[in-house]
Image (tube, rainbow, N blue to C red):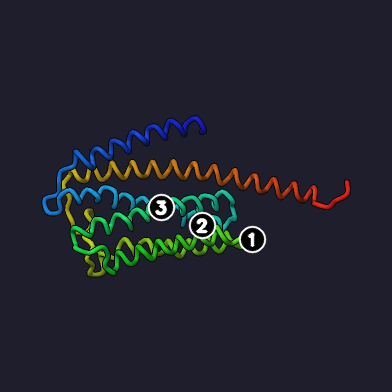
């Protein structure tokens, strides 16, 4: 598996470069918004990737709550970390896109507000994991992750059930999209998903190594307590 990582990293870099070319050059220019609409190819795939990562975090947290498997706890942690990064991209690119189109950076409609709440929940999750050292921290974090996951479908369906300034979904929600734009959108989502997988993979290996080292140090401290007479 270690040998496969650099190969996948190179392939992902190529895919990201190709997706960048498609988004900035090949994709047709939107007639109403112009070139600023090209942020769409980063805004939407980032949101979809974040939702997938938060769903994996939800499943891993449930597994940990039920079976107490350390591997599930690590998966929950790393997917939350990477998911927050992609969700942050969503919150940054959204206002950049909105300013020239809506004339404002932010509006407190249901989609934007619920996305911010989702981001805050998972940031709180990471703060809990980082600054709490109690033995029950993984359990509390897993419970918080389940709460956060319940917010994901609400964020997605908010523009279906509430009147919002946010556009309707381009697929399955009454919207429409040029087939070429859809092609570029899906290629970018694939590229972002591959990149997220690689980051999670690297972060998982690092976290597991760190826990193994901490466990070894704890075992050494038990076998050789300070102040003991040899």
Real-space CA distance between mark 3 and mark 1, rounded to the nearest whole angstrom: 27 Å
Q: Which residue is mark 2?
A: 61
Relative to residue 229, is residue 33 drawn left or right? left
Query: SS class of the residue under badge 1?
Result: loop
Relative to residue 141, is residue 179 drawn left or right? left
Real-space CA distance between mark 3 and mark 2, rounded to the nearest whole angstrom: 19 Å
Q: x, y percentage for residue 189? A: 31, 45
Q: Quadrant of residue 167?
A: bottom left
> How would you rate the neighbour count of disc 1 (Cα within 10 Å): few for under 14, some for 14-19, many for 20 or more?
few
Q: Are marks 2 and 1 in contact (CB under 8 Å)?
A: no
Residue at the location (42% across, 34% down)?
Answer: 8
Query: SS class of the residue under badge 2?
Result: helix
Give the foreground label among 3 and 2.
3
Residue 10: image tag: none
Query: Toward the viewer: 205 or 39?
Result: 39
Which residue lies most toward the left here? Answer: 31
Relative to residue 26, is residue 62 drawn left or right? right
> How would you rate the neighbour count of disc 3 (Cα within 10 Å): few for under 14, some for 14-19, many for 20 or more?
some
Real-space CA distance between mark 2 and mark 1, rounded to the nearest whole angstrom: 16 Å
Indicate the quadrant containing the C terminus: top left, top right, bottom left or bottom right: top right
Which residue lies most toward the right here? Answer: 229
Q: Which residue is mark 1?
A: 135
Label 3 or label 2, whichever comes before in sequence order: 2
Query: SS class of the residue under badge 3?
Result: helix
Residue at the location (28% across, 41% down)?
Answer: 187
Q: Which residue is mark 3?
A: 85
Give the foreground label among 2 and 1.
1
> How would you rate the neighbour count of disc 2 (Cα within 10 Å): few for under 14, some for 14-19, many for 20 or more?
many
Label 3 or label 1, whichever comes before in sequence order: 3
């Amino acid at each position: 598996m270690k040998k496969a990582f650099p190969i996948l990293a190179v392939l992902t870099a190529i895919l990201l470069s190709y997706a960048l070319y498609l988004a900035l050059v090949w994709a047709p220019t939107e007639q109403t918004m112009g070139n600023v609409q090209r942020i769409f190819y980063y805004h939407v795939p980032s949101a979809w990737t974040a939702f997938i990562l938060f769903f994996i975090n939800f499943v891993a947290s449930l597994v940990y709550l039920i079976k107490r498997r350390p591997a599930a706890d690590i998966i929950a942690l790393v997917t939350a970390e990477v998911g927050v990064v992609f969700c942050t991209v969503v919150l940054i690119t959204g206002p950049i896109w909105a300013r020239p189109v809506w004339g404002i950076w932010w509006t407190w409609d249901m989609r934007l507000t619920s996305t911010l709440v989702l981001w805050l929940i998972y940031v709180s999750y990471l703060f809990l994991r980082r600054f709490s050292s109690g033995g029950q921290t993984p359990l509390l974090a897993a419970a918080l992750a389940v709460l956060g996951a319940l917010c994901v479908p609400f964020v997605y369906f908010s523009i279906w059930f509430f009147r919002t300034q946010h556009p309707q979904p381009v697929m399955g929600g009454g919207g429409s999209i040029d087939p070429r734009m859809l092609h570029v959108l899906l290629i970018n989502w694939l590229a972002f998903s591959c990149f997220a997988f690689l980051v999670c993979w690297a972060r998982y290996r690092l976290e597991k190594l760190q826990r193994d080292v901490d466990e070894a140090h704890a075992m050494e401290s038990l076998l050789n307590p300070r102040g003991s007479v040899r």
